[in-house]
Image (cartoon, rainbow, N blue to C red):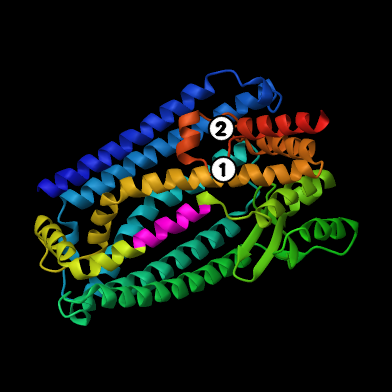
Amino acid sequence: MLLKMILIVFLVIAFGWQRWISYLTWKQRDKPLPEVVSDIYTPTRYAQFLSYKKEYAKMSFWVRLGTLALNIFFILSPFFTWFDGTNPYVCAFLTYLVMELIQELIDLPVEYHETFHIDEKYGLNKQSRKSWIKDHILDFGFETFVTLVVGGLFIYLCTHLSRWTSNFSISYSQSFLFGLIIVAIYLILMITMSFLSLLVMRKKYTFTEMEDGELRSQIEAYASEAKKKVRHIKIYDESKKSNDKNAFLLKFLWIREFGIADNFINENSEDELLAVLLHEIGHLKHKKNIWNYMHYAFLVLVFLFFVWLIPHAQYIVDLNALINRSFGLDHTNYVLSLMVFSYVFVPVSFVTGLYHNFVSCKEEKEADKNAVDHGYGQALIDTFTQLSSDELIDVNPHPIVERFYYDHPGMYQRISYIQAWENEHAS
């Protein structure tokens, strides 16, 4: 019972943390916008922004509260004993399927309301109900498939590891080789899943190669500055779903291509498009620095910890036995075990998330400078200004919230340093 109480306390703390973050967010929104971003919203549009965010915040609160209640039910009820059985694959599959379906019963009505009532009310949704259903089926199918494949391999590894390692009595050199094999399998699996994710994206949107012409030639000329060549420039039909004006660079193995929303092509100037694409080209030109190497060093440490852990896996087995006893199980439920272990690693993932956001923001700033250096700083500001107003973006997030959760600098930060660079160029 002690373990169950610890898990519930953790969930309540996590819920309280989110409420604190929400409090900081709204405290910041009560302040006047800084001068740098004060012209992004007209008073009427800013009132719409606040109203829009309040409606979303209200829905978010009830979803989090419902999810908290659901998780407490899973912990305190005999839920996991209902699936207790000798076959670990069937046990895990049924547990995951029921939990996922129950969560979907909460999420789907909420997402439907957000899309077809809130977003539509503020002119942000252009998606049909048929397209919305199709996208959800694709996402649910992909996530379920990935979970079953990855989960199945994980269960297979856990159920055979003791036998393969002679009850964990292997040397560190053997553990090292064993770890390399697992990493190789993991990489192959992640590459396969990434290809499947790309396929799902292709099913959601129609991508069409940009026609030859002066604009394409200009994009290709700027892209040629990077050693990593862009092979395709494609336009996708975002206008069928929303008014988002996104442009991104897809980098995966040998694949290098620009994706540009048709909204962007149709409603923004060529200079604004080039400014955003020069930002993406800035990412291609990025050279590894100390922050990137620290990330690699951390991955090496994680691998070495895994190598150490294999000969000492009895600790994990003992902890898993404690989980089974606490929940009255005769056999391991890997969904439950992973859930408990994931709580243990939340502090680690939080710290690594902070580091990731820090490095990502530095790289975004570097990419912005590439657009400024080519004379498109003001065009980039104009793009940010229009996108923020059109898509009701929070242009001045609370500094703590920005540091914890933003992997791109907020608009206030971005426009401020772009203006500073522009002034340096002018002088």
Indicate the position of residue 211 as horizontal and vertical percent values.
84, 64
* Identity, as a three-letter code, of the amino acid under mark 2: Tyr
Are there few (<14), some (14-19), or many (20+) residues within 10 Å of tag 2? some
Mark 2 vs mark 1, CA separation in Å = 26 Å
Res. 117 image quadrant? top right
Q: What's the magenta bit mostly, secondary-structure-wise?
A: helix
Res. 145 image quadrant? bottom left
Q: Secondary structure at mark 1?
A: helix
Of tags 2 and 1, the one toward the viewer is 1
User: Which image quadrant: the C terminus?
Assistant: top right
| In magenta stretch: residue 124 | no
- Furthest toward the right, the residue is 214
Indicate the position of residue 72 as horizontal and vertical percent values.
22, 46
* Identity, as a three-letter code, of the amino acid under mark 1: Cys
Give whichever of 205, 257 is nearer the camera.
Answer: 257
Q: Residue at x 71, y 64 (%)?
A: 207
409 to 216, vertically: above or below: above
342 to 92, vertically: above or below: above
Does residue 18 appear anywhere in the picture? yes
Q: Secondary structure at mark 2?
A: helix
Residue 361: give its label. Answer: 1
Indicate the position of residue 221 as horizontal and vertical percent values.
83, 59
Are there few (<14), some (14-19), or many (20+) residues within 10 Å of tag 1? some
Residue 52: give its label. Answer: 2
Q: Residue at x 65, y 62 (%)?
A: 205
Indicate the position of residue 94 as horizontal and vertical percent values.
27, 68
Give the magenta part as a residue range: 292-302
